[in-house]
């Protein structure tokens, strides 16, 4: 079985500041990792994913996440946030016998202040 | 991108009644649909996986007779909460996919808020 922990339930930052949203996972098998974003009144949208290959993955809107197997982490970072990045972010994992099923973290609400 | 809708967006019902929630893939055929439940300040919990034309596969601890899932077409799945009680109040989210492989992205609906009085 897998589990995902997002250590921060809320992260407030000022516009143009850097941000890191933390995600740690637990699994006894190889995993595949995802970050989803949920804007108000919308469904979850895939932000980026790690399946294999380079451990650093990027999204089209400037976010990046690095898969760190030794630390069992997949933290999400952005060097300079915008007001429009305000949303809830979910880290998720799948793998092993749970292949195809997503196990989610509790979510982190990112609030970007002007 | 692929769009998934849910109806209704929120529903309030009396205890003991049944409520049906619809999940539709608007611009693609979804062979697989997933139903999740989200409690306040908690993560999404997978309830069941349904493949078109087959019986749903429920996660451990989810009562299949209480949460009836039907996936009769490639664009529609329904979740019926039977004999609802206040503890069933929650946010229900569906997702739709063209399969269960890693390259079959899940597209999520906006969710349905159920309140049982």
Image: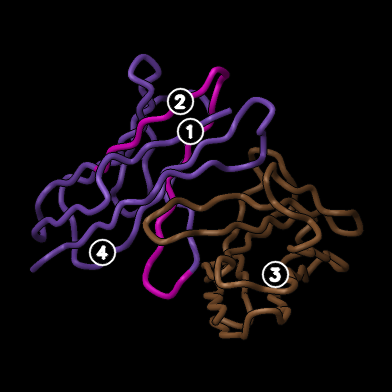
Q: Which chain is brown?
A: B
Residue at 56 percent across and 50 percent down: it is B45
Task: Using the numbered discs, state the Cα–Cα distance from disc 3 to disc 1 in whole angstroms.
Answer: 28 Å
Q: Whole-percent x and y of residue A110?
A: 24, 57
Q: In the drawing, what numbered circle is on residue A3?
A: 1
Residue at 27 percent across and 50 percent down: it is A9
Q: Are marks 4 and 3 in contact (CB under 8 Å)?
A: no
Tag 4 residue: A86
Task: Using the numbered discs, state the Cα–Cα distance from disc 4 to disc 2 in whole angstroms.
Answer: 27 Å
Within 10 angstroms of label 3, few (less than 14), some, or many (20 or more) residues? Answer: many
Tag 3 residue: B25
Task: Using the numbered discs, state the Cα–Cα distance from disc 1 to disc 2 in whole angstroms.
Answer: 5 Å
Q: Quick check: A25 above or below B72? A: above
Q: Say which of B73 and B45 sits in front.
A: B45
Q: Whole-percent x and y of residue A71?
A: 33, 19
Look at the image and give the residue range highlighted in magenta.
A21-42
Secondary element at image label 1: strand
A79 lies left or right of B104: left
A91 lies left or right of A10: right
Secondary element at image label 4: loop
Q: Say which of A52 and B15 sits in front.
A: B15
Q: Tell me where residue B41 sits by quadrant.
A: bottom left
Q: In the drawing, what numbered circle is on residue A26?
A: 2
């Amino acid at each position: 079985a897998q589990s995902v922990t997002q250590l921060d339930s809320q992260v407030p930052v000022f516009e143009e500041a850097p941000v890191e949203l933390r995600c740690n996972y637990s699994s006894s098998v190889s995993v595949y990792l995802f970050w989803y974003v949920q804007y108000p009144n919308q469904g979850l949208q895939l932000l980026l994913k790690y399946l294999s290959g380079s451990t650093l993955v990027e999204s089209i809107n400037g976010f990046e996440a690095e898969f760190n197997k030794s630390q069992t982490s997949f933290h999400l970072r952005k060097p300079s946030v915008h007001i429009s990045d305000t949303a809830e972010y979910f880290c998720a994992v799948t793998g092993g016998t749970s292949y195809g099923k997503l196990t989610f973290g509790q979510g982190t609400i990112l609030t970007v202040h002007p | 991108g692929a769009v998934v809708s849910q109806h209704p967006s929120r529903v309030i019902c009396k205890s003991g009644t049944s409520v049906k929630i619809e999940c539709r893939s608007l611009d693609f055929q979804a062979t697989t649909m997933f139903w999740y439940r989200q409690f306040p300040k908690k993560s999404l919990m997978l309830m069941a996986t349904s493949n078109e034309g087959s019986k749903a596969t429920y996660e451990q601890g989810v009562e299949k007779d209480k949460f009836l899932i039907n996936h009769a077409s490639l664009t529609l799945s329904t979740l019926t909460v039977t004999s609802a009680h206040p503890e069933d109040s929650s946010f229900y989210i569906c997702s739709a996919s063209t399969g269960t492989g890693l390259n079959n992205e899940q597209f999520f609906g906006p969710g349905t808020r159920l309140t049982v009085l």
